[in-house]
Amino acid sequence: MSLPEAHISSLIVQVSPEHLEETKKRIEAFDEAEIYGVSDIGKIVVVLVTQAEGFITDVIEKINNMPGVLGASMVYHQIDSGTDTGIDTNKNNLAPDDGYSVSEEQV
């Protein structure tokens, strides 16, 4: 049995300070988004947890189109997926397969 993938990514959103509160509210409206940090000069750290990679680019596009947003950039992306291959990975002196694998990508 295979578990669904989980895509965890973080974004830096640069926004005009006068639009900061409005932008935070709009970002928080996304079910999969959580704000982890905000600076008074207009930077917002956003973490997304989704089951599909395509959702990440959709959210970035929507944030980039919000009033006052100067830019949104993904700075981290990790894919967690459960695997159950039935293959004995210990034959090659590898760590035992616990059915969980992680792939990371920093951008």
Image (spheres, rainbow, N blue to C red):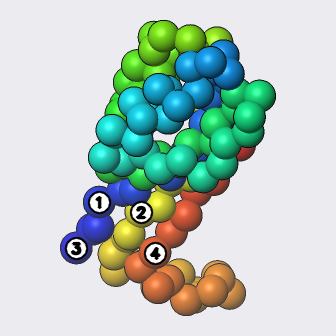
- Under mark 4, the amino acid is Tyr
Q: Nearer the viewer, residue 83 or 59?
A: 59
- List the residue tagged with mark 4: 100
Q: Earlier in the sequence, mark 3 or mark 4?
A: 3
Q: Which mark is residue 81?
A: 2
Dots 3 and 4: beta carbons under 8 Å?
no
Q: Is 1 in front, or is 59? A: 59
**Mark 3 or mark 2, which has the lower sequence index?**
3
Task: Count numbered badges in the picture.
Answer: 4
The residues bearing labels 2 and 1 have C-alpha atoms spaced at a distance of 6 Å
Which label's residue is closer to the chain start, 2 or 1? 1
- Image coordinates for residue 17, horizontal then vertical, percent: 67, 22
Residue of label 3:
1
Residue 62 point in image, percent of width and height: 40, 19
> Which residue shows up at 70% across the image and 27% down it?
42
User: In the shown orientation, is residue 43 left or right of residue 60?
Assistant: right
Secondary structure of the residue carrying numbered label 4: strand
Could you say whether the residue bearing mark 1 is in a helix, strand or loop?
Answer: loop
Q: Nearer the viewer, residue 78 or 23?
A: 23
Q: Is residue 88 above or below residue 77?
A: below
Q: Quadrant of the C terminus?
A: top right
Measure how far apart labels 1 and 3 are at the Cα level.
Answer: 10 Å
- Residue bearing the label numbered 1: 4
